[in-house]
Image: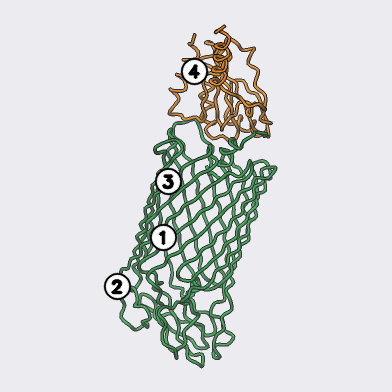
Chain colours: A orange, B green
């Protein structure tokens, strides 16, 4: 009998402590990637730090894919040609999806570019950060390693 | 983009107005800008050629070092303040070594100027306290034959509202030394009088406070308020004021006299609007007022048209209107007592000025961006009504100027 209100309380507690997503917009379906650590990296052609983050994301893709890392770059340019021009100068070897109407960016309430969302092997959001600084690369890599080796 | 808030566009709008060079993956980035400029006034007046360079070095932390360097060469002639006359006038040159002969019926111009100025500056900008607060400090120095400038500056900026708003404040001090050719003349003395000191000083303090605000996905606004105070030697040592009698004959030419302090304020606003097809409309207005009695208004607008393929053309128009300084006079009446201050420098007079031009930009190899600028400037002073003997002569006729510039960012 005590269990039911407790369950309700725990459920409520978990709800308010996990990320609350916006009612509008659409999430990206990562259910088929269960078992992998999924990194959603939101970027745009006008994002200057993204020119630094791409080479690092490429490096992480090469280094950590064998451990189950999957990087998906989510582009939010309204005009896909702008994204393509960016990719000519800054190629990406990781997967890319295009979100020109911002439905995914809206769903995840992305505050600015670049924003990285890291989902654990169960598909739960584990870590989020915005911006990219080359002097924080060790920190970013340590976060990936923590999520990759987590139980 | 159908985001429910305007957070995302903060970085977009900042890139709209930033210098933004293509960066590589190296730890330290350099972006450079170099340009040459020609400025030439009508009627053999002032001509200026200049070369400028600016380099910005950004390191891993986002710290920025900005270096700038410039060389300006000035030739041609400039109105000396002497009133036009039906007679030929002969004045001693500033050095005292020679004379300048001004023909009759023409605006007297001083053509003894030939000067080169070298200027350098550096500014350091970095995060302080936290990610959203940045501080900067800089210095500037310039030298030409009779003028030396030293300046230091500092500023703070803070981002708020998820980078949608930026507050900034800045302060700068300048200590300038003027060593006029032939020494500084005593104000209101004539050309035969003994000169004063061979070195004068002028100190300036400038303060600015501003806010940059993203208004929407496509619009950004900046508003600045500025205060400026200059103390010390504010005269132009080479400019004259003529005393003219009732028949229109010049009885004496006196060195000009200006106050030794000038305090001013200005308000500036600029709006950038991003239109479809990456066309950009920029409109600004600036209002200035000071205790010399000069009020001015500048309205400026340019429209950058994206032609595709890294090319664009940006037509530009500027309107400027200025009131005269309280002590500006085209000339003095020799029958009247001298006022406290007087100057016939055309730059202190009442005039309208118009600029029309365009900038054409194109992309070169290796991500370089080239630009060529052509502008026409026209200064249109208010009518000066001279006395009977000088009827038909204009003490301040105005002039036109051509500006051409070629620049590259790499």
* Residue B261 at x, y percent in the picture: 39, 68
Identify the chain of the residue marked 1, using the numbered disc in the image.
B
Residue B156: image tag: 3
- Residue receiving disc 2: B197
Q: CA distance from mark 3 to mark 1?
A: 30 Å
Identify the chain of the residue marked 3, using the numbered disc in the image.
B
Q: Residue at x 48, y 46 (%)?
A: B167
Q: CA distance from mark 2 to mark 1?
A: 23 Å
Q: Residue at x 50, y 60 (%)?
A: B266
Pointer 3: residues within 10 angstroms few (<14), some, or many (20+)? some
Q: Residue furthest top?
A: A1
- Residue receiving disc 1: B117
Residue B129 falls in which quadrant of the image? top left
Q: Residue at x 30, y 75 (%)?
A: B196
Q: CA distance from mark 2 to mark 4?
A: 71 Å
Q: Secondary structure at mark 2?
A: loop
Residue B334 falls in which quadrant of the image? bottom left
Q: Secondary structure at mark 4?
A: helix
Which circle's residue, 3 or 1, is located before the other in the chain?
Answer: 1
Asked if marks 4 and 3 touch (Cβ < 8 Å), the reply is: no
């Amino acid at each position: 009998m005590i269990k039911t209100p407790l369950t309700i309380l725990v459920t409520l507690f978990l709800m308010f402590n996990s990320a609350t997503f916006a009612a509008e917009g659409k999430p990206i379906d990562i259910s088929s990637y269960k078992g992998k650590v999924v990194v959603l990296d939101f970027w745009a052609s006008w994002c200057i730090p993204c020119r630094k983050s791409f080479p690092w994301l490429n490096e992480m893709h090469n280094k950590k894919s064998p451990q189950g890392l999957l990087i998906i770059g989510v582009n939010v340019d309204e005009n896909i040609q702008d994204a393509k021009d960016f990719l000519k100068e800054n190629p990406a070897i990781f997967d890319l999806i295009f979100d020109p109407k911002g439905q995914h960016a809206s769903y995840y309430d992305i505050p600015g570019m670049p924003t990285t969302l890291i989902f654990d092997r169960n598909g739960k959001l584990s870590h989020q950060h915005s911006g990219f600084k080359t002097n924080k690369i060790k920190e970013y890599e340590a976060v990936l390693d923590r999520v990759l080796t987590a139980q | 983009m159908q985001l429910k808030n305007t957070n995302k566009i903060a970085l977009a709008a900042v890139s709209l107005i930033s210098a933004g060079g293509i960066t590589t993956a190296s730890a330290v980035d350099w972006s450079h800008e170099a340009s040459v400029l020609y400025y030439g006034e009508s009627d053999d007046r002032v001509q200026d050629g200049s070369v400028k360079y600016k380099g910005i070095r950004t390191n891993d932390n986002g710290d920025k070092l900005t270096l700038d360097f410039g060389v300006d060469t000035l030739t041609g002639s400039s109105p000396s303040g002497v009133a036009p006359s039906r007679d030929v006038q002969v004045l001693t040159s500033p050095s005292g070594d020679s004379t300048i002969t001004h023909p009759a019926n023409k605006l007297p111009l001083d053509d003894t100027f030939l000067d080169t100025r070298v200027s350098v500056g550096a500014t350091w900008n970095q995060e302080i306290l936290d990610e959203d607060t940045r501080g900067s400090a800089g210095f500037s120095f310039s030298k030409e034959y009779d003028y030396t400038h030293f300046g230091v500056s500092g500023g703070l900026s803070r981002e708020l509202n998820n980078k949608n708003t930026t507050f900034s404040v800045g302060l700068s001090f300048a200590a300038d030394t003027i060593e006029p050719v032939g020494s500084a003349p005593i104000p209101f003395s004539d050309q035969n009088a003994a000169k004063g000191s061979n070195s004068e000083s002028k100190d300036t303090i400038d303060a600015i406070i501003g806010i940059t605000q993203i208004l929407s996905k496509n619009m950004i606004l900046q508003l600045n308020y500025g205060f400026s105070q200059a103390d010390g030697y504010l005269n132009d040592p080479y400019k004259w004021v003529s005393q003219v009698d009732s028949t229109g004959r010049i009885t004496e030419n006196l060195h000009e006299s200006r106050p030794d302090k000038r305090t001013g304020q200005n308000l500036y606003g600029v709006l950038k609007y991003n239109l479809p097809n990456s066309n950009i409309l920029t409109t600004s207005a600036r209002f200035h007022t000071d205790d010399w009695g000069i009020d001015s208004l500048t309205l400026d607008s340019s429209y950058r048209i994206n032609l595709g393929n890294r090319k664009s053309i940006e037509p530009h128009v500027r309107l400027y209107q200025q009131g005269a300084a309280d002590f500006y006079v085209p000339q003095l009446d020799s029958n009247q007592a001298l006022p406290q201050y007087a100057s016939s420098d055309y730059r202190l007079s009442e005039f309208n000025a118009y600029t029309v031009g365009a900038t054409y930009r194109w992309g070169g190899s290796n991500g370089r961006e080239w630009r060529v600028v052509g502008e026409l400037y026209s200064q249109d002073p208010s009518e000066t009504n001279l006395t009977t003997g000088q009827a038909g002569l204009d003490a301040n006729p105005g002039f036109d100027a051509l500006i051409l510039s070629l620049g590259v960012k790499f």
